[in-house]
Image (cartoon, rainbow, N blue to C red):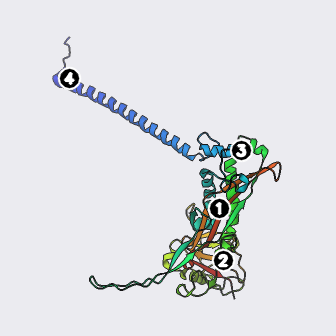
Amino acid sequence: MDTPTTTPDQAEASFDIVARQDKTEADVASLRSDVDEVKARVDKIAQAATRAARPAIGGTEDAAPEVKGFVDGYLRRGATAEFKSISGAVASDGGYAVPRQIDAMIARELQEISPIRAISQVVQTGSAGYRKLISTGGTSSGWVGETAARPETDTPDFAEIAPPTGELFANPAASQAMLDDAGFDLENWLASEIAMEFARAEGAAFVGGSGVDQPMGFLSTPVSTAEDSLRAFGTLQYVGSGDASGFDANPDAKLIDLVHTMKSGHRQGASFVMNSATLAEVRKLKTADGAFLWQPGLVEGQPDRLLGYPVIEAEDMPDIAAGEYPIAFGNFRHGYLIAERSATQVLRDPFTNKPFVHFYATKRVGGQVLDSNAIKLLKIEA
């Protein structure tokens, strides 16, 4: 019986097959290595995201030493040896400055729950007072040739803004048993309570504050029907509704008039401000052809719109009634200025209301209309 022989071509083909198998296995091994590397990177990213999602403070080992000392030392036990008073040598003179991390938590919550603050211009100050110069015009401009003489320009006119300020305070209380419980998240609770009380008080002041030991609200500003170039600086323009009981027969026309009394530069970024009762009435308004003026937000997280502009609910705005200004339309980033000292102070008081411990928190906040051309009002009148 003859033994089969392998031709050179067959041997070369077998070698190629083995070589391809080796290459395939090497490719598979390389792919597995790449997949393992990608998986390791994804795991690292997931771990980093998990760490980032944790609260910046909250009794964890990662909390800054000054935060742990402030919370566990001063807030829980009243220890004051390691802290320096803001305005004096002892706590009763002015309290202790809240660490920056807790102050940032309070600021974030204020931004979320204080409607006017969320849309206004906010500046941080290092002192109790803040002043800003505003140009009201006067500087001329023109065209000249390349070699022509340049004429002198007029001296610009300025107005000074000095927002009235007041001391905003909150006084939340916790029982001593709560403070002794190591599982009680004291710093988050305190930041939330302070922010809630601050937001409630400053929301009312930014709308209707008198300017005496508190911000000057935009509804407390002088008003006029004159156009922008004809009104005194600091006076807001209003549009009358034409109906003492509410909106007249053509509500869309009045709202359109309100929008277009504002110059186009301010309309970019403008929004309507009203309370929920007024909002309920506005949502029922229709044009002459039966179309609703109201446009619900189509994307989650986006505000509802009126005539194409966002609507902000501020419960401190007045209801619809004769002589009131229930709707404001404006670019509040240009039109209203909030000036505040960044440091919040807290004074621990375990004596006034035993067995509760009060935390008296204070902060200086001011506010005033910045550009009176950037805010317009709708007045309910006959």
Nearer to us of marks 4 and 2 is 2
Mark 4 to mark 1: distance in Å? 80 Å
In-image side of 76 versus 235 (left or right) = right
What amino acid is at disc 1? Answer: Ile
Q: Tag 1: Cα neighbours inside 10 Å, few (<14), some, or many (≥20)?
A: some
Answer with mark 4 or mark 2, whichever residue precedes in sequence.
Answer: 4
Q: Which image quadrant is residue 276 in?
A: bottom right
Q: Tag 2: Cα neighbours inside 10 Å, few (<14), some, or many (≥20)?
A: many
What is the residue that sits farthest to the left in this orientation?
8
Q: Position of residue 269 (x, y in %)?
A: 52, 71
Mark 4 to mark 2: distance in Å? 96 Å
Q: Position of residue 328 (x, y in %)?
A: 62, 76
Circle 4 sits on which residue?
A: 11
Q: Tag 3: Cα neighbours inside 10 Å, few (<14), some, or many (≥20)?
A: some
Q: Kindly indicate whether the residue at mark 4 contacts the one at mark 3 (C-beta within 8 angstroms).
A: no
In-image side of 25 versus 199 (left or right) = left
Q: Secondary structure at mark 1?
A: helix
Circle 2 sits on which residue?
A: 219
Q: Residue at x 60, y 43 (%)?
A: 65
Q: Residue at x 18, y 17 (%)?
A: 5
Q: Secondary structure at mark 4?
A: helix
Q: Position of residue 35 (x, y in %)?
A: 41, 36
Q: Is residue 146 above or below residue 176?
A: below
What amino acid is at disc 3? Answer: Ala
